[in-house]
Image: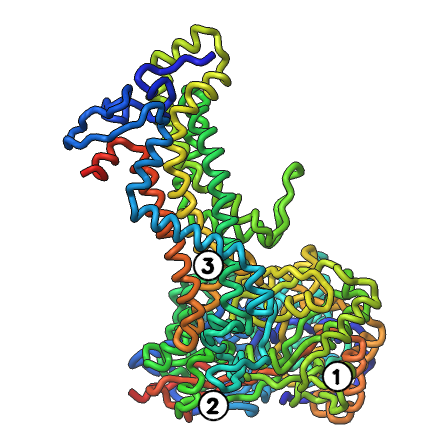
């Protein structure tokens, strides 16, 4: 839950639009926080833990990282003015002060955020943290075209001009290095701006850090770890940051052990290595291999964790056949959600609404095109396709190699063929999938997509349906939905502070039902993630954070 | 009219075998000369070189046995549609995730609630089990075999034709043409085959290929076939070039020149017949290599594109389930091994039959 600031203020027009990407899906960003014992700075690593992840982070540079895998690494490494609490489960969704001494105060009708840096902060390279570094970091994210840059350009005064090159700095951010004061002026009130400040992309790096992708040699930051020994797409090391003084930032404890992160595309191997103790943490974003599920679930170091996430097939509304609502309806009618659930080893609950359970605004009304807990209706779907005169239309279906996503797409392509389309699969490597389908030039017709919350607010999910989120690169509105009703609702709802979300729950529900009725996305379920560790990990102390997976700084070894 | 090379014929017919490599045992009568090992080969009057080779091949029972195995696999794969419709009652693409099937008198899920597919039932439906998407493995195996063989065949054709062309042109003209072609072949050869194939395969499969005069859609079987066909050209072109270099200066080629024949006619009429045997020997070996490379590329996602089956994609898809559903990798892996083994051993037999030096080993 996030820290509410009362935003009075006028309507933020474009606001909703702007937000976007950083989060979620296999793409998203992060923030950090702490839990656990606060310790003294620079705890010494007595041994190293090994984390195996199925998909390499897209970037290890905080101002570029856009996936949960990236955020998992940058969350305990880089800290912004605010971050998320380093606690287990839902408690980790609270925004707490990071490098700022307190959560920013809000004034000017919700349009001005003011914070002051804690004194004496140092980066991992020993340099002092200055208030102006914050401005530089946001400018860097804009210059590097971070996938969620609309969060900045749509909200912060002058951010757009800076990105376009018509201004030399962001006029809406003023800083005072002497006092550590940071003032941010917004174009209009935006209820979730604290969450924007908690993104890893908003983390502070030193002024002068190269304006280029530094994933192979990540820049200094303030956090429990520093990232070293990067071998792209293979491994990297989370090394304890010896300069980090946890006493300066209550709530962000130091790390206990160094962590070797290895990319292991085969989830079977990944799970086996944790079972046999050659690795310690199974990445929650990966699917447990069916053959080992009984063995894993019997382990005392396993638990299923609820996350706010959805799986869906995007349906490009700007290209045939899915510019026809009948074609989109047909897809939803035909999908057999229980079958898809089996492909994910039974790890998700069938559903049809874009907002997952647990997010304000998740509708309770029956789904408009059939009960998702039952099998799909192929005959009805086929009739719809025929009625639309679209039988035989070629459809390229995009997917990624990671299991069960490839299996989802195999199944989906088969269904499309059954209902009358001529589907061809395009399976891409995991690391390049979202950047590829997010390139507007490719203009993909349909394919796999998912979204994990960046922060607990429905607006985070609806960035994917906001017309202003359509971008030439790193586009996340894959369906290219441009619906005036959605846009106007988001404009109004986006101003509502998190603390008051309950007051607009019905309105969010109505919007989500409208989206389901329009069949803009073929949602088929909501996943649960596994928290699974080796026997030598202190499981009780291990923090699962619904936003990003495991808080690696909470790993403690008992053997 | 083409001049014949002295000593390269039996009863006036071209053997297609280079005397330079035939240990000086050119056959000119009804009885073969006594060979080094003291064995003799009886030759019927008017017996052509390929008849002689066939006769030798027939004596190589092992090679013939594996040749028959390969033919059996081909026939089975050709019958895939019949098997799918009349026995398994499904298609290679149909998902049966939530279906059930009878196994040992019990009704079981084709794919369990935890995502584990059923193993071999030894009945018509799911004879060899199901894959993670509930697709019939036996049906996909046969259809996958068709794809693997089709790609291997087309790739081999491309390799042999272009390899012959490049090798003959380079060896015959030498000089600039030889330099250009040889450097080009070296560039291809220098790049690891699988890496090169995977890189090109991924690019073309995603975006297709449009060169104006050539247009390929991503996902078509022609993509891996062309890639494989091209990456193996040096493996044919270089030995062919070497052979041509040794032939082009011989008397019968000079005689052809003296008669005023053009380059094309000399290459087609005099040079080509002298490298044909080499090409024939390479065909089965190249076919086996192509099928293996196709499997490797498909395993890596750069060959046959899902949901199209091939043995490589089936193995790749099955790896994540090896402990719980080993049939997913074992079945296509076994088929791949048998097929390649069949081709290779038969190919060795063909080579032995066409190569008099190799014949010695058989005769002994």
Q: Considering only vertical position in the picture, is B56 above or below A325?
A: above
Q: Is residue B186 left or right of residue A83?
A: left
In which quadrant is the C terminus of chain A drawn? bottom left
* Disc 1 element: loop
Q: Considering only vertical position in the picture, is B138 above or below A186?
A: above
Q: Considering only vertical position in the picture, is B143 above or below A284?
A: above
Asked whether B203 or B73 is in front, the reply is B73
Q: Which mark is residue B312?
A: 3
* Disc 3 element: helix
Q: Earlier in the sequence, mark 2 or mark 1?
A: 2
Furthest residue in direction front, as rendered: B45
What's the CA distance linking mark 2 and mark 1? 32 Å
What's the CA distance linking mark 3 and mark 1? 38 Å
Residue A405 at x, y percent in the picture: 56, 71
Which chain is indicated by disc 3?
Answer: B
Residue A28 at x, y percent in the picture: 59, 73
Residue picked out by circle 1: A370
Q: Considering only vertical position in the picture, is B194 above or below B316?
A: above
Q: Is residue A472 visible?
A: no
Q: Is residue B137 visible?
A: yes
Which chain is indicated by disc 2?
Answer: A
Tag 2 near tag 3, CB within 8 Å: no
Which chain is indicated by disc 1?
Answer: A
* Disc 2 element: strand
What's the CA distance linking mark 2 and mark 3? 35 Å
Question: Which of the 4 image quarters holds residue A476?
Answer: bottom right
Mark 3 Cα-neighbour bin, 10 Å: few <14, some 14–19, many ≥20: many
Residue A254 at x, y percent in the picture: 41, 84
| In this view, the mark in front (2 or 3) | 3
Mark 2 Cα-neighbour bin, 10 Å: few <14, some 14–19, many ≥20: some
Residue picked out by circle 2: A303
């Amino acid at each position: 839950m996030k820290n509410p600031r009362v935003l009075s203020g006028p309507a933020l027009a474009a606001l909703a639009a702007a937000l976007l990407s950083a989060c979620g899906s296999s793409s998203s960003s992060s923030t950090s926080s702490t839990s656990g014992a606060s310790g003294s700075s620079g705890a010494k690593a007595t041994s190293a833990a090994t984390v195996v992840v199925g998909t390499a982070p897209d970037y290890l540079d905080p101002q570029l990282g856009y996936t949960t895998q990236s955020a998992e690494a940058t969350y305990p490494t880089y800290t912004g003015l605010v971050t998320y609490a380093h606690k287990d489960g839902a408690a980790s969704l609270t925004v707490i002060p990071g490098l700022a001494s307190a959560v920013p105060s809000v004034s000017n009708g919700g349009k001005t955020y003011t914070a002051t840096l804690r004194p004496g902060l140092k980066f991992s390279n020993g340099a002092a943290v200055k208030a102006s570094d914050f401005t530089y970091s946001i400018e860097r994210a804009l210059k590097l075209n971070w996938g969620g840059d609309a969060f900045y350009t749509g909200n912060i005064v002058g951010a757009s001009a800076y990105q376009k090159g018509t201004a030399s700095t962001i006029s809406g951010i003023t800083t005072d290095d002497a006092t550590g004061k940071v003032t941010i002026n917004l174009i209009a009130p935006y209820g979730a701006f604290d969450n924007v400040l908690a993104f890893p992309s908003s983390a502070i790096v030193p002024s002068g850090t190269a304006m280029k992708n530094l994933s192979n040699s990540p820049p200094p930051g303030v956090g429990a770890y520093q990232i070293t020994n990067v071998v792209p797409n293979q491994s990297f090391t989370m090394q304890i940051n010896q300069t980090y003084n946890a006493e300066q930032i209550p709530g962000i404890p130091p790390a206990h052990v160094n962590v070797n992160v290895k990319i292991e595309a085969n989830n079977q191997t990944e799970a086996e290595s944790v079972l046999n103790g050659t690795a310690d943490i199974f990445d929650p974003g990966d699917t447990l291999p069916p053959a080992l599920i009984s063995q894993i679930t019997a382990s005392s170091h396993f638990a299923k964790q609820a996350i706010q996430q959805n799986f869906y097939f995007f349906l490009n509304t700007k290209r045939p056949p899915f510019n026809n609502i009948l074609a989109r309806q047909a897809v939803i009618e035909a999908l057999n959600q229980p079958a898809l659930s089996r492909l994910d080893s039974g790890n998700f609950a069938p559903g049809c609404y874009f907002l997952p359970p647990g997010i304000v605004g998740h509708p309770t009304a029956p789904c408009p095109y059939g009960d998702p807990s039952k099998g799909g209706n192929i005959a009805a779907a086929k009739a719809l396709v025929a009625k639309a005169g679209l039988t035989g239309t070629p459809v390229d279906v995009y997917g990624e190699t990671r299991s069960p996503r490839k299996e989802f797409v195999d199944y989906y392509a088969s269904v499309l063929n059954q209902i009358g389309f001529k589907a061809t699969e395009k399976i891409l490597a995991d690391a390049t999938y979202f950047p590829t389908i997010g390139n507007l030039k490719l203009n993909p017709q349909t394919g796999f997509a998912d979204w994990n919350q960046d922060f607990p607010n429905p607006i985070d999910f609806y960035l994917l349906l906001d017309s202003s989120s359509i971008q030439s690169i790193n586009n996340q509105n894959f369906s290219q939905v441009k619906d005036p009703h959605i846009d106007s609702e988001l404009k109004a709802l986006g101003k509502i502070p998190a603390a008051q979300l309950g007051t607009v729950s019905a309105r969010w529900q109505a919007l989500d039902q409208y989206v389901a009725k329009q069949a803009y996305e073929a949602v088929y379920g909501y996943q649960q993630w596994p928290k699974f560790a080796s026997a030598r990990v202190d499981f009780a102390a291990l923090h699962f954070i619904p936003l990003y997976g495991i808080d690696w700084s909470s790993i403690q070894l008992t053997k | 009219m083409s001049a014949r090379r002295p000593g390269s014929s039996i009863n006036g017919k071209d053997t297609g075998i280079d005397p330079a490599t035939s240990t000086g045992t050119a056959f000119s009568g009804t009885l073969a000369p006594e060979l080094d090992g003291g064995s003799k080969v009886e030759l019927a009057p008017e017996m052509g070189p390929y008849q002689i080779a066939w006769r030798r091949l027939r004596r190589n029972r092992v090679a013939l046995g594996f040749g028959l195995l390969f033919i059996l696999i081909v026939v089975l794969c050709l019958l895939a549609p019949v098997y799918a419709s009349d026995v398994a009652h499904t298609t290679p693409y149909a998902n049966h995730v939530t279906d059930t099937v009878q196994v040992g008198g019990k009704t079981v899920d084709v794919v369990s609630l935890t995502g584990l597919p059923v193993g071999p039932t030894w009945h018509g439906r799911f004879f060899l089990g199901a894959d993670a998407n509930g697709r019939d493995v036996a049906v996909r195996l046969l259809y996958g075999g068709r794809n693997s063989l089709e790609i291997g065949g087309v790739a081999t054709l491309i390799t042999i034709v272009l390899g012959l062309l490049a090798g003959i042109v380079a060896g015959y003209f030498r000089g600039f043409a030889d330099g250009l072609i040889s450097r080009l072949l070296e560039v291809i050869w220098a790049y690891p085959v699988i890496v090169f194939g995977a890189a090109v395969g991924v690019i073309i499969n995603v975006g297709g290929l449009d060169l104006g005069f050539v247009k390929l859609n991503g996902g078509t079987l022609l993509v891996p076939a062309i890639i494989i066909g091209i990456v193996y050209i040096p493996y044919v072109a270089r030995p062919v070039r070497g052979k041509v270099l040794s032939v082009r200066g011989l008397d019968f080629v000079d005689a052809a020149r003296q008669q005023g024949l053009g380059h094309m006619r000399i290459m087609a009429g005099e040079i080509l017949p002298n490298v044909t045997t080499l090409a024939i020997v390479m065909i089965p070996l190249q076919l086996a290599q192509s099928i293996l490379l196709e499997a490797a590329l498909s395993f890596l996602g750069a060959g046959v594109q899902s949901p199209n089956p091939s043995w490589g994609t089936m193995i790749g898809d099955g790896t994540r389930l090896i402990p719980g559903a080993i049939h997913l990798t074992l079945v296509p892996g076994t088929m791949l091994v048998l097929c390649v083994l069949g081709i290779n051993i038969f190919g060795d037999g063909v080579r032995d039959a066409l190569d008099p030096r190799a014949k010695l080993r058989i005769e002994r």
